[in-house]
Amino acid sequence: MKIHEYQAKEVFAAFGIPVPRERVAARSDEAASLARELGMPVVIKAQVLVGGRGKAGGVKKVESHDQVESVAGSIIGMDIKGLRVNKVLVSECVDIRSEAYVGIVVDRATRAPVLMASAAGGVEIEEVAKATPEKILKTAIDPAAGLLGFQARNIGMALYGDAKLAREFAGIAQKLYRIFVQKDCSLIEINPLVKLGSGSLLALDAKINFDDNADFRHKEWEEMRDLSAEEPTEVEAKAAGLTYIKLAGNVGCVVNGAGLAMATMDLIKRYGGEPANFLDVGGSSSPEKMVTAMRIILSDPNVKAILINIFGGITRCDDIATGLLQAQKQADIRVPLVARLTGTNAEKAREILKGSAVTPADSMADAVKKAVALAGGAK
């Protein structure tokens, strides 16, 4: 789950990380009023859950108060990479002397959180990693011990070459790690972390992604969630107890279990196809859930064939088959369906589907090959 910059900075401030004086506005006249309170000049920043705001014209410095309302009005309602800007952050201008990047993410290779930093701040860290990976400093964090002071200070000294700034950086980094753990984050970043003319450090931007698996113990997340910035079908799927992620391919996938879903998508790629989605119906599946799953997949016009790959344990294959027939009656399904159903009540499921328009498959590989071929063949 992603949250907006202004929300991330509210979290930062609560943990003692220094941030600029700034306020969020949903209307241009409100932005003008806030600019009057902050004093000119100000920076107006689009609040949208995607990168590249500056390049898209969503971040602008305004020198005159007379221009604030028109600039804010031009940003509010702007489309940035398919997302509409509904709010802007009106922020004070600060005296920037240098910019750095600092972030924490889970590294699957070391199975631990990793503190990353770079003196090449203010640009996308992915570009830095690709062009000049030697500029990225890393240290693995032992989850049992946490981020130790000397680890953070070593990174700070490498960035700034100054003991005072290294200690200040270490304090900010350790607070970031506390947020990372206490708020169940999957990613937390400051880009840029700026050195001011006064010599102190300030988080000029903020990014936090929460791990959805922990939402049961963070009721406050529901209020922070911006559903308008999420894929509507993904929101509908979550409400129905499904896990759905839209992708760019043409082979729709219905599976049970995340591991099987990943293996199915890998096999689609192996045989030259492109998966259109990740859709996990979960450990148990009623016919009604299957109907919803099919409706969601069919809402994607790119889908040219649908692969149903079920390994029945708790999930009953006959429920899946019944749901498929119900979906065929309730929806105008104009794409071919391929089903591999094995496990609990698989024989019963095959009897239910006998004579239907669903193409049966004997194995996972057979099912994938048939679905890829029906979707238009290998690319």
Image (cartoon, rainbow, N blue to C red):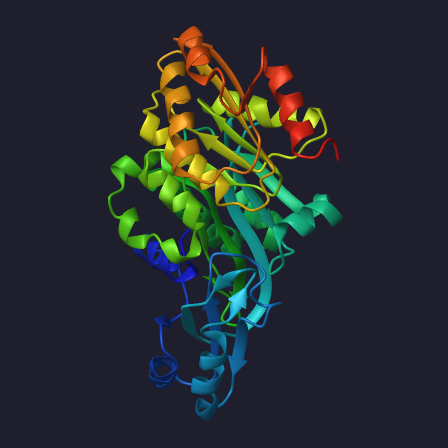
User: Nearest the camera: 95 or 259?
Assistant: 259
| Name of the residue lying farthest toward the front | 355
- Residue drawn at 54 percent across, 64 percent down: 80
Identify the image quadrant of the C terminus.
Answer: top right
Q: In the picture, residue 318 is in which quadrant?
A: top left
Picture coordinates of residue 14, whole percent (x, y): 30, 55
Question: Total number of numbered labels?
Answer: 0
Residue at (32, 24) in percent of width and height: 286
* Nearer to us in this view, 123 or 102: 123
> Does residue 148 appear in the picture of this structure?
no
Q: Is residue 288 above or below residue 18?
A: above
- Residue 17 in percent (x, y) is at 39, 56
The N terminus, quarter of image: top left
Please report the residue visible at 72 percent of the width from the left and 46 percent of the height from the top. 130
Image position, residue 361 (x, y; %): 58, 15
Left or right for 301, reference 167: right
**Does any portion of residue 370 appear in the rendered image?**
yes
Residue 278 vertical position relative to residue 54 in the rendered view, above or below: above
Q: Is residue 369 left or right of residue 156?
A: right
Q: Nearer the viewer, residue 93 or 90?
A: 90
